[in-house]
Amino acid sequence: MKSQRRTAVLVAVVGAVAFVALAWWLVPWDPVGRPVVPARAEDVFTAAELSRAESFSRWARAWGWGGLAVSVAVACWLGFTVAGERLVERLPGPRWVVVVLAVAACELVGRVATLPFAVAYQRLRLEVGLSRQSWGGWLRDVVVSQLVVIVVTALALLVVVAAASRWRGVWPAVVGVALAGFVVLASFVYPLLVEPLFNRFTPLPAGPLRSEVLALADREGVQVEDVLVADASRRTTSLNAYVSGFGETRRVVLYDTLVEDAPREQALSVVAHELAHARYDDPLRGTLLGAAGALAGVGLLGLLLGGSAADPRRVPRVLALLAIAMLVTSPVESGISRVIETRADVEALAATGDPEAFVDLHRRLALRSVADPSPPRWSQWFFGTHPTVLERIGLVGRATSRPCLPASRSGRCRRCR
């Protein structure tokens, strides 16, 4: 249908142009302002530490890339051969039930095929002490995360099939707008609905750390409703923190491992990094980019599937195209993420004024996560969402100055008052 094809082209072009324009406008492509020379690995880590990190990372990449290759291969087998159609044809019920069951069946086939790689990776994490989780707890997390994926994906596919059946000529526009809105909505409800499925949160008790976190947030001009502690030690020994929510619902969340195992100066350096994300509304920037990407993706889907998108038997093909799209766009997402993370590091250095704590923190983080200080360039380019530890340490002394924050009611800079 010509009208449907024209609509799909228009949606794809609008989404792509919006993504490029938003990326140009919102992404801090030069967050440091001058070249950063990574620190030398031998100046930061001992030979034994480097050997341990390289050994772990070698096997972690093997299991990770192996699992990814198998998952994409299985998705393509189901999506581009008769296997997927035959699977869907055996499913009972009305059309909407078939769509949900088709998503669940395809996802479960992929999960079963990649389960050996996930088990091998978890064994590796247990061997190096990166995980404390029991196999029962690990399996529970696998099941819950898979259910979340099935529910979210099934909702999206129901929208695609329903719109393609109801508005054959313009369904890419209807679905594109709907899914872009869904991306925005999901970013708001995720902290409330999904995070509690994996962690329990309790308020950080009154004390020096809580007071300093709130004071740091106030100096940075970030409104924080509460400071919470997540029981992350049930599954990991790594140190982390993040800022969750938007506006009045914004919370600083600290891993209990960070609270218990890191010096207060290092914990504040992590918090300063996360507050920088909140100060610049980085989650919102990511949400807007994701919405534009969803719009462009739906346009391309309309070009590839046309009116056949209304047929539930095409569900496996949509999932295969989604798997390929996620793989192809990974370098773009990773590159954008790295520069945003670099800016947050620069802000953290400026906010705390404690480069020694920053360096000690990232050395500690690398050792606790058994991170490879010098990963292969192709791996970092494709999947590296953060700068390497050596690049981050190399920021010390290179970070540029930044302007004062907007004045508070007293008329003085929020940070300098």
Image: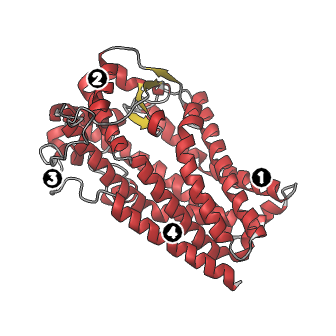
Quadrant in the picture for residue 279:
top left
Q: Residue furthest left?
A: 397
Work out whether residue 387 or residue 349 is closer to the camera in this orientation and state it: 349
The three-letter amino acid code for the residue at tag 3 is Val
Q: In which quadrant is the N terminus drawn?
A: bottom right
Q: How is the image coloured?
A: secondary structure
Look at mark 1 in the image and give the residue it sits on.
Answer: 101
The residues bearing labels 3 and 4 have C-alpha atoms spaced at a distance of 36 Å
The residues bearing labels 2 and 3 have C-alpha atoms spaced at a distance of 32 Å
**How far across and down, in percent of the image, does residue 160 sit?**
69, 63
Question: Residue at the location (60% across, 36% down)?
Answer: 193
Disc 3 packing (10 Å; few <14; some 14–19; many ≥20): few
Q: Residue furthest right?
A: 93
Disc with the residue nearer the chain's start (3 vs 4): 4
Q: With respect to residue 239, does 69 lie above or below?
A: below
Look at mark 3 in the image and give the residue it sits on.
Answer: 37
Disc on res. 15:
4
Q: Judging from the image, what secondary structure is the residue with disc 3 in?
A: loop
Disc 2 packing (10 Å; few <14; some 14–19; many ≥20): some
Disc 1 packing (10 Å; few <14; some 14–19; many ≥20): some
The residues bearing labels 3 and 1 have C-alpha atoms spaced at a distance of 52 Å
Q: Report the side of 217 relative to 224 (left or right).
A: left
Q: Report the side of 372 relative to 306 (left or right).
A: left
Q: In which quadrant is the C terminus drawn?
A: top left
Question: Residue at the location (41% across, 23% down)?
Answer: 256
Look at mark 2 in the image and give the residue it sits on.
Answer: 212
Disc with the residue nearer the chain's start (1 vs 2): 1
Question: Residue at the location (57% across, 31% down)?
Answer: 196
The three-letter amino acid code for the residue at tag 4 is Gly
The residues bearing labels 1 and 2 have C-alpha atoms spaced at a distance of 50 Å
